[in-house]
């Protein structure tokens, strides 16, 4: 807990450090969202129709959030590539 408190204090002192931290955490979020999106294509690990429907809703939401965290063109390119991969499977 002390390490986290020290990190927060340092972030409060430096705008550059805070910006770097925000960039780093954005990258982590984007990577996790992409991973989740890819894992839930075609219903994820389930072939049950309800799971497939729910995963499509989740992926639609992830697509919106990726558009927030990424440049729009990059997000659209990722979604197109994922759709092409889904269709090839």
Image (cartoon, rainbow, N blue to C red):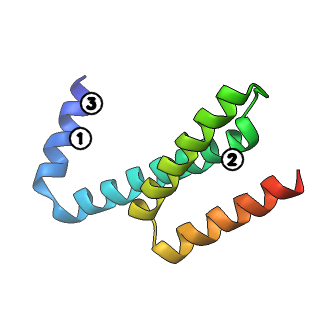
For the residue carrying disc 3, how many other residues have a C-alpha within 10 Å: few (<14), some (14-19), or many (20+)? few
- Identify the image quadrant of the N terminus: top left
Please give left or right for residue 48 compared with residue 37 in the image. Answer: right
Which residue is the extreme one toward the right? Answer: 89
- Say whether residue 30 is left or right of residue 1: right
Q: Residues within 10 Å of mark 2 (few under 14, many from 20)?
A: some
Q: Which mark is residue 41?
A: none
Q: Is residue 45 visible?
A: yes
Helix, strand or loop under label 3: helix
In front: mark 2 or mark 3? 2
* Residues at circles 2 and 3 in contact by the CB criterion of under 8 Å: no
- Can you identify the residue that label 3 sits on? 3
Residue 77 falls in which quadrant of the image? bottom right
| Residue 23: image location, x then y, percent | 37, 60
Where does label 1 land, which residue?
A: 7
Q: Residue at x 63, y 62 (%)?
A: 79
Q: Are marks 3 and 1 in contact (CB under 8 Å)?
A: yes
Q: Please say whether residue 28 is visible from this viewpoint.
A: no
- Residue at 46% x, 48% y is 29
């Amino acid at each position: 807990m002390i390490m986290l408190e020290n990190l927060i204090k340092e972030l409060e002192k430096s705008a550059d450090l805070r910006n770097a931290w925000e960039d780093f955490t954005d990258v982590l979020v984007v990577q996790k969202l992409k991973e989740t999106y890819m894992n839930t294509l075609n219903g994820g690990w389930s072939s049950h129709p309800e799971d497939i429907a729910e995963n499509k809703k989740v992926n639609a939401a992830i697509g919106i959030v990726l558009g927030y965290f990424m440049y729009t063109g990059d997000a659209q390119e990722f979604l197109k590539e994922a759709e092409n991969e889904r269709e090839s499977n």
